[in-house]
Amino acid sequence: MPVTFWVDAFSNIKGRPAMLFNRKYSFKKQLLASFLVSTAMISTPAVAQHQTDESGDGLWHAFGAYASDYNYCDAVMIGKLWNKDGQAGMEFILNKIQNGLASDVPLYLRDSRNAGNRCTFEEIEYAYENALAIANIWGVGIAQAKAIMTEQISLGNSAYVTNALDQALAGQNSNTPDSSRERAWEAYASSNYGFCDAKMVASLWNTDILEGKYTIGRKIMNGIADDVPYVRQQSYDAGNRCAFEDTEFTYDDAVAFARNEGLNVQQAKLSIAMLRSNGNGHRVLRTAYPQ
């Protein structure tokens, strides 16, 4: 049975949206129940996204009140499973919550992500100014910032974007471009990160390695150095790799590694490059020179 909207359920509280967001009201469940009817499939949405008639208003209010763990992009991702839009996704999520099946929602989101579905920048509810601020703190172009923000939110990593925006809006990257780059370089050069790390960061965002170094430096400057391993891992998961020559290890290290692992030197180099690419460089010396 498809979802049915009950517009009258909201007509007596129109103009008082705060009540919908107050979880102390005893009529909360009854209100949601009157808004949703048990469903086994997603219906075709009755009104367009962001439309401000009573039905559209009611859906957005209910979604904000009862599905606060999710955002519009999540709804879009759900809708895409059945070639529906974000409003259909909101209806689906609300019905799951109403029917005591809220734990199903993450499973559907996972299926949508695994199917390759993603939101557009317009569907993640951030503005151009947000992308510009984040581009500055990440040291990338605006188009790249939009793409990264969209990918992260589509994958359920909204906190990653929120934290970056908080840092940007706090003015922690307010230096002139030249002085900012100089300080970023100094931060990178004095860190424990190396050429391979910069290459992995740059490869994820399709920038040159110098920009990868600046990006690492900016993250250190802005107190988000913990992002670097996360970005490196994402790059690794996307199939990017360093070559042995990109690492800090020597031919002698490769020979020792090969001897202890029963490999030839070329195989050892490939193994070392893979370990270093995903942040496990410490295992190389431990294997090559066991105590």
Image (cartoon, rainbow, N blue to C red):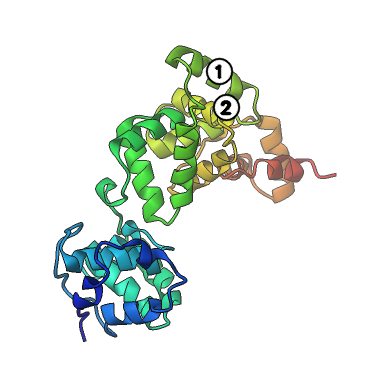
Q: Which residue is mark 1?
A: 183
Tell me the amino acid under the disc marked 2.
Answer: Met
Q: Are marks 1 and 2 in contact (CB under 8 Å)?
A: yes
Q: Which is more toward the observer, 212 or 92?
A: 92
Q: Which element type, helix, strand or loop, lies under badge 1?
A: helix
Label 2, on which residue? Answer: 221
Q: Position of residue 202 (x, y in %)?
A: 44, 33
Q: Quadrant of residue 221?
A: top right
Q: Residue at x 30, y 40 (%)?
A: 127
Residue at screen point 29% across, 67% down: 90
Q: Secondary structure at mark 2?
A: helix
First in sequence, mark 1 or 2: give its number: 1
Question: Can residue 246 be seen at all in this image of the molecule?
Answer: no
Looking at the picture, tell me which residue is in the foreground, 187 or 198: 187
Q: As displayed, is residue 10 above or below residue 187?
A: below
Is 287 left, or right, of 52 in this rendering? right
Q: Position of residue 258 (x, y in %)?
A: 68, 43
Q: Residue at x 40, y 72 (%)?
A: 105
Vertical arrangement, residue 258 with respect to residue 129, above or below? below
Q: Locate residue 194, reporting x and y percent.
A: 59, 29
| Dot 2 alpha-carbon crowd within 10 angstroms: few under 14, some 14 to 19, many 20 or more | many
